[in-house]
Amino acid sequence: MKSELFAPANLEQNVPGGFGLQNERLLKVTLNGDLLARQGAAVAWQGDIKFAFEGAGAKRMIKKLVTGEDLQLMRISGQGDVFLADYAAEVHIVYLENESVTVNGANILAFDSALSWDLKRVQGVGGMAAQGLFNIVVQGTGALALTTIGTPVVLDPATQPTFCDPAAAVAWSTQLAPHVHKTDGIMKSLIGRGSGELFSLAFHGQGFVIVQPSEGYPWSTGAQGQNTTGGGIGGLFS
């Protein structure tokens, strides 16, 4: 049988253990143990692989009920290969080394089970409920796979104040501690396609901010759409 489908780029790629990219939109994990992934993200698997629901724990469950942030995870365990994707979004891998990063929950695809996660509130929100104001802090040592709708840009907020639509903010250095920057109605009508809220996220200091060229998918359900808050990155930092 002959077809461009069988070109080398489309054949299964060898991943020397752990997380790797089959291609820019498909994560391959060579599994010998377990990992946590977004529910429904597995598109294929080979070997002895098992799937189970992963609870958030009592404290995180309370935060989820209060914030509306909903990171629904499954635990994947066994030995074999697992392929993960999220509506053909681009996949980027971040390797944490006893570090932490703040991530928009809608942009988390999978991460090592050795990493811990928790919900954090963006400063200056008060009682407002809107996009991207409650995010996920992932910390420890291990691999974290993120998705972006389109190819993102990595901004340096150290040289000048940096602002972005909350739904377009993918991840940022935890030490940056962004705050809410209110804008007037005229400004909001000219920038972004977010929720219509009159604010943006403001960053300033040492670190990075990863921004995708989209404020989310146009539908409100699905993997990236489960949470309306928006979607190694080594390649982005090089």
Image: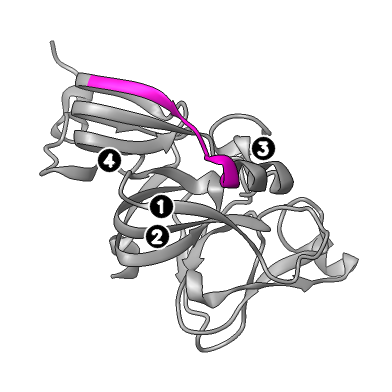
Which amino acid type is shown beneath numbered disc 2? Gln
Question: Separation of disc 4 and disc 2 at Cα?
Answer: 26 Å
- In the depicted structure, whether residue 213 falls above or below residue 182: above
- Mark 3 crowd level (few <14, some 14–19, many ≥20, 10 Å Cα): few
| Mark nearer the viewer, 3 or 1 | 1
The mark closer to the camera, 1 or 4, is 1
Mark closest to the chain's N terminus, 3 or 1: 1
Residue at x-position 17% and y-position 23%: 6
**Residue ID for mark 4:** 23
Q: CA distance from mark 3 to mark 1?
A: 31 Å
Distance from disc 3 to disc 2, alpha carbons, whole Å, reads 31 Å
Q: Are marks 2 and 1 in contact (CB under 8 Å)?
A: yes
Amino acid type of disc 3?
A: Pro
Farthest residue toward the bottom? 159
Is 231 on the left-hand or right-hand side of 93? Answer: right
Q: CA distance from mark 3 to mark 4?
A: 24 Å
